[in-house]
Image (spheres, coloured by chain):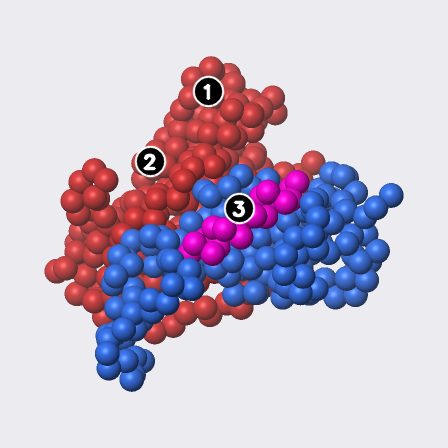
């Protein structure tokens, strides 16, 4: 059996190593499929559904589905783009996202997706839920207003014994992601910074510093999220 | 042919969006050639004197006066544009949403660290004062809004390009950098 498989994404012929997840395979072919809960080096969860694609006629999450020989994948088609947009819009109205006062603004993946999708206003009513900010931890602030429950921190931030420093608390609509009271005590400066970096939004912030990168030099100030991936394609052609 | 007429207002906003509007610099001379202004803090016309083509709304609705002005704009303007985060989602004033009004008022006038002198413990109650709404509302949850210009404030280029597109009826081409939420 060949190590490589051939498939198409929106009609473009692609090739990738067998068993690779569709998002990663697409990336290698210079095609960006938007993701949010996915994080390099962390087992994919297929939670946020932003990476939804149509594989041989069926909707699948591109972060959890491996490529296979002859797959026909649709990504940038009207209904899927609309679906991705509505997920972003729902996340904006579900929490409290006051971007002008947020430290993550300009470096935030949720905001960057809204920019990429040219969302000027969410089509859903704002919920303005009452959420808390937990500033009791010595090193980090956990702002529940901005948490999108992507679980990236829970999956990526672990102590030396592999235990998650962050955890879910409560259930259903009351669920929130919190710092484990015991394990959180041992959070090193390095791990605190890593948890801020892992969080796609501004829900985990390292204390005593902020707004370090000036407006104009932030990650998504000049280039849309995903354009680095698409750029590879441009230079290849 | 008469020029298109523009009206502008600031509801629960900080006038930053109007400042950004003025940031179009010398293009304001071009704008004056293109349009005529009616009710607006820019020319200080207080009441509508005619029907307008475009109404620019800064700020959301935090009190009865805001709601009244917004409805008046809807009645008088063919096209209404929400300008800035506050008009679009309530913005900074909406940070009080979720906190009961009585608590907000008590913090501001009775118990807050900067309160002094209010010995009789009076909450502002003059009948002339607008009534606070239970929460701060985005404009499109009060009246129909036709277009939205995000930003805090929206970039001058965004306001300029939008106005030119609306007036000339040309398609709006926005560079990536022009649309930002901060
Ligand atoms: S987390 Fe992102 S979307 Fe939410 S307020 Fe901060 S910058 Fe805006
Ligand atoms: S804190 Fe950040 S990384 Fe953790 S679940 Fe919330 S949004 Fe995701």
The residue at label 2 has a CB less than 8 Å from ligand 2: no
Looking at the image, is B145 positioned above or below residue B60?
above
Q: Which residue is more in the foreground, A110 or B84?
A: B84
Q: Any idea which chain is the blue one in this picture?
A: B
Crowding around mark 1 (Cα neighbors within 10 Å: few <14, some 14 to 19, many 20+) is: many
Q: Nearer the viewer, mark 3 or mark 2?
A: 3
Give the residue number, with chain letter if any, for mark 1. A55
Alpha-carbon distance for marks 3 and 2?
42 Å
The disc at residue A47 is: 2
Q: Looking at this rendering, what residue extends furthest in the right direction?
A: B1
Q: Any idea which chain is the red one in this picture?
A: A
Circle 1 sits in a helix, a strand or a loop, which is it?
A: strand
Q: Which residues are magenta?
A: B61-88
Give the residue number, with chain letter if any, for mark 3. B71
Chain for numbered disc 3? B
Name the side, left or right, on which B132 lies relative to B147.
Answer: left
Alpha-carbon distance for marks 2 and 1?
18 Å
Circle 2 sits in a helix, a strand or a loop, which is it?
A: loop
The residue at label 1 has a CB less than 8 Å from ligand 2: no
């Amino acid at each position: 059996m060949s190590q490589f498989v051939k498939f198409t994404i929106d009609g473009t012929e692609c090739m990738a190593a067998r068993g690779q997840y569709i998002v990663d395979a697409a990336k290698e072919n210079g095609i960006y499929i938007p993701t949010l809960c996915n994080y390099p080096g962390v087992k994919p969860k297929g939670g946020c559904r932003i990476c939804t694609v149509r594989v041989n006629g069926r909707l699948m999450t591109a972060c959890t589905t491996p490529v296979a020989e002859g797959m026909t994948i649709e990504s940038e088609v009207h209904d899927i783009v609309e679906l991705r947009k509505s997920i972003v819009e729902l996340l904006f109205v579900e929490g409290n996202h006051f971007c002008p006062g947020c430290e993550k603004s300009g470096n935030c993946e949720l905001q960057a997706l809204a920019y990429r999708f040219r969302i000027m206003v969410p089509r859903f009513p704002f919920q303005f839920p009452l959420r808390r900010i937990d500033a009791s931890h010595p090193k980090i602030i956990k702002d529940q207003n901005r948490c999108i429950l992507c679980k990236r921190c829970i999956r990526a931030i672990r102590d030396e014994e592999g235990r998650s420093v962050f955890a879910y608390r409560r259930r259903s609509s009351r669920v929130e992601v919190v710092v484990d009271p015991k394990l959180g005590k041992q959070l090193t400066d390095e791990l605190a910074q890593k948890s801020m970096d892992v969080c796609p939004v501004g829900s985990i912030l390292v204390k005593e510093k902020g707004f370090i990168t000036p407006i104009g030099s932030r990650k998504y100030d000049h280039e849309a999220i995903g354009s680095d991936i698409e750029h590879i394609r441009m230079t290849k052609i | 042919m008469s020029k298109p007429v523009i009206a502008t207002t600031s509801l629960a906003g900080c006038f930053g969006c109007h400042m950004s509007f003025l940031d179009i610099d010398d293009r304001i001379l071009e704008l004056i050639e293109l349009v005529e202004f009616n009710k607006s803090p820019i020319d200080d016309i207080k009441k509508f004197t005619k029907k307008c083509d475009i109404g620019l709304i800064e700020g959301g609705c935090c009190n009865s006066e805001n709601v009244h002005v917004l409805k008046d704009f809807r009645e008088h303007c063919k096209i209404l544009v929400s300008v800035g985060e506050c008009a679009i989602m309530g913005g900074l004033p909406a940070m009080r949403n979720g906190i009961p009004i009585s608590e907000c008022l008590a913090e501001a006038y009775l118990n807050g660290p900067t309160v002094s002198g209010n010995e009789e413990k009076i909450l502002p109650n003059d009948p002339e004062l607008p009534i606070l709404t239970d929460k701060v509302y985005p404009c499109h949850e009060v009246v129909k809004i036709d277009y939205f210009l995000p930003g805090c404030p929206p970039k001058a280029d965004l306001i300029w390009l939008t106005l030119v597109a609306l007036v000339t009826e040309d398609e709006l081409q926005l560079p990536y950098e022009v649309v930002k939420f901060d």
